[in-house]
Image (tube, grey):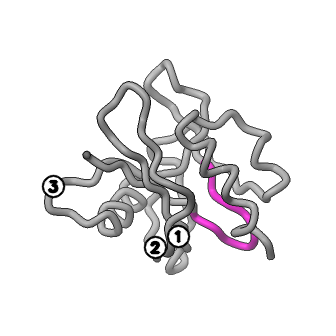
Amino acid sequence: MPVIVGAAIVADGRVLACERAAPAEVAGMWEFPGGKVDPGESEVAALIRECEEELAVDVEVGDRVGDDIPLAGRDYVLKVYLARLRGDRRPQALEHSDLRWLAADELLTVPWLPADAPIVAALPPHLAV
């Protein structure tokens, strides 16, 4: 089954959330950055590439968060990994409407895409400072 990877980028007890700009049916909802794993590409390599393309940052990919999440209506599975920023560059909203760093008690202040909700629920232990 094809894979979509997501990055739960954590820094200083907060996780980076990205507001979708498009398509219209999900614009305004929040997600973790990431995208499709290309044929012959590892999940980690795809996540590093996607974070560079979407946010102009380099990340160090860590452990998985949560379980595989089948995407409703699509023949894909979502896999989310913890990640940390590498270097001095800070995330830029190149493909998103907005970016926010959310602490554990702020995770539910934005409307998450349904596929990301199980990951959001699994994040608080990883955000303890």
Provide the secondary structure element on which disc 3 rests: loop
The three-letter code of the residue at mark 2 reads Val
Report the magenta residues as a range. 9-17
Side of 97 relative to 129 (left or right): left
Q: Quadrant of residue 112?
A: top right
Of the numbered discs 3 and 2, the one sitting upstream in the chain is: 3
Of the numbered discs 2 and 1, the one sitting upstream in the chain is: 2
The three-letter code of the residue at mark 3 reads Pro
Residue position for label 3: 39
Q: Nearer the viewer, residue 118 or 42?
A: 118
The reply to whether the C-beta atoms of the residues labelled 2 and 1 are less than 8 Å apart is yes
Badge 1, how many Cα within 10 Å: few under 14, some, many 20+? many
Q: Tell me what residue is drawn at x 58 percent, y 46 percent.
A: 18
Q: Tell me what residue is drawn at x 57 percent, y 35 percent.
A: 113
The reply to whether the C-beta atoms of the residues labelled 3 and 1 are less than 8 Å apart is no
Residue position for label 1: 83
Q: Tell me what residue is drawn at x 42 percent, y 40 percent.
A: 70
Of the numbered discs 3 and 1, the one sitting upstream in the chain is: 3
Q: Nearer the viewer, residue 70 or 29?
A: 70
Provide the secondary structure element on which disc 2 rests: strand
Provide the secondary structure element on which disc 1 rests: strand
Q: Tell me what residue is drawn at x 49 percent, y 64 percent.
A: 81
Our reading of the magenta stretch's main secondary structure is strand
For the C terminus, the quadrant is bottom right
* Separation (CA) of disc 3 from disc 1: 22 Å
- For residue 61, the mark is 2
Indicate the position of residue 23 as horizontal and vertical percent values. Answer: 43, 24
- For residue 72, the mark is none
Indicate the position of residue 28 as horizontal and vertical percent values. Answer: 61, 29
* Separation (CA) of disc 2 from disc 1: 4 Å
Indicate the position of residue 86 as horizontal and vertical percent values. Answer: 50, 78
The three-letter code of the residue at mark 1 reads Ala
